[in-house]
Amino acid sequence: MLRNLWLTFAQAVAVGLAALFIVATLKPQWLPQRLSRAPSAPAVPAPSTPPRPAESEASRGTAILSYSDAAQRATPAVVNIYTTKEVRLPRDHPLLNDPMFRRFFGEQFSQRQQTASLGSGVIVSADGLVLTNHHVVESADEIEVLLPDGRRAQAKLVGTDPDTDLAVLKVALTDLPAIAFGSAEGAHIGDVVLAIGNPFGVGQTVTMGIISALGRNQLGINTFENFIQTDAAINPGNSGGALVDSTGRLLGINTAIYSRSGGSMGIGFAIPVSTARQVMDQIVATGSVTRGYIGVEPQDVTPELAEAFKLPRKEGAIIAGVMRGGPADKAGVKVGDILVAVEGKPVANTAGMLDLVAQLRPESTAKFTFVREGREQELAITVGKRPKPVSRNGQR
């Protein structure tokens, strides 16, 4: 008897709960107020977080999927650069001894040939200053700049810096669309960037990627290296073009690619705008770049070297050679010394050492900290002027 009553009670409760669930879902207004869902309270932003302006779905999609605004801001300032160079054929060249060739093309043509190359550049001032790569204009006899609006102008070489592979040109035009400078120091790995240039001579092209790495050095491309690495497609002809951020501001000057085939493999390098601007200012002011020099051959302190020679530390630069009669030699620097600081600034490797020494003013005296036989020693060195590098054609 009790069992039957319990079963009846349980069934009634189950039916009642089911009925209550259905009414609460379909007709909540039939229930007493305390059983119905409370209306949502309006969201009140925290005092420290101001409310953001409303965005439509279209505007949010455009901000994510298109960088046309950045491209439109930057592309008018990126130019194509065409160079020509006259080269002499060697005296023992077979064509010079071919009578038919000399008869049809003449004596003068048989001795000289014109070679042409192309690259890109960036307008950095409204009065006609253009930044590009040193290797784009190296040894050129004539330089022509083609603007995106179709105008052409002969360019004058203001100066170059082979150590950073930068050059400054000047064109006799005014009111040019100069690019806005960004901040390479504020860039982060993963930021979206656009590479703008003239790859393979097909015309101005914009490619997109991200910053893959910062501070790349010791690649053997330039003497002074602090590259921005990107996977934005950079191909031959992009050299000297612009690497810009997602707002169209200049972050770097495209200079090199890593490639086994000659085409883009997703590893491109750009010179940071901070370096480019510093070099440009010196070239415009004096026509060249002056750097400090102490006359040593440095080598990185690797973990293997530190272990093999029982070195006291794994940072710094080992002095592997000292130029006889140079600033370091006169100050008493010896082979095997480890340079650990320049003017109190720590030296991590040879790249860091070169940068620190280059920033010193020639003929000034600076304090260099070395480790010799396990003990730190400070030497005062009178800084010299870094000699000009030997160019590819053997000239300085």
Image (cartoon, rainbow, N blue to C red):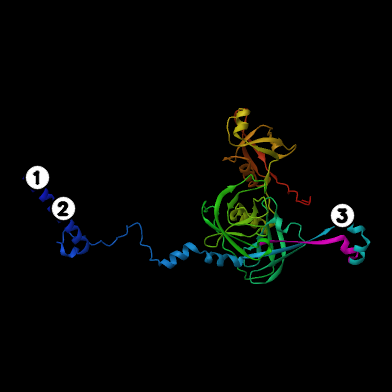
Q: Earlier in the sequence, mark 2 or mark 3?
A: 2
Q: Is residue 140 left or right of residue 299?
A: right
Q: Earlier in the sequence, mark 2 or mark 1?
A: 1
The numbered mark at residue 14 is: 2
The numbered mark at residue 3 is: 1
Residue occupying the point 90% across, 67% down: 104
Which amino acid type corresponds to the residue marked 2 in the rendered image? Ala
Q: Circle 2 sits in a helix, a strand or a loop, which is it?
A: helix
Alpha carbon separation for disc pair 1 and 3: 117 Å
Dot 1, crowdedness within 10 Å: few (<14), some or many (≥20)? few
Residue 116 belongs to magenta span: yes
Percent from the top left, x then y, of residue 174? Answer: 65, 70
Range of residues picked out in magenta: 105-120
Alpha carbon separation for disc pair 2 and 3: 105 Å
Determine if residue 155 is in view.
Answer: yes
Q: Residue furthest right?
A: 99
Residue annotated with mark 3: 90
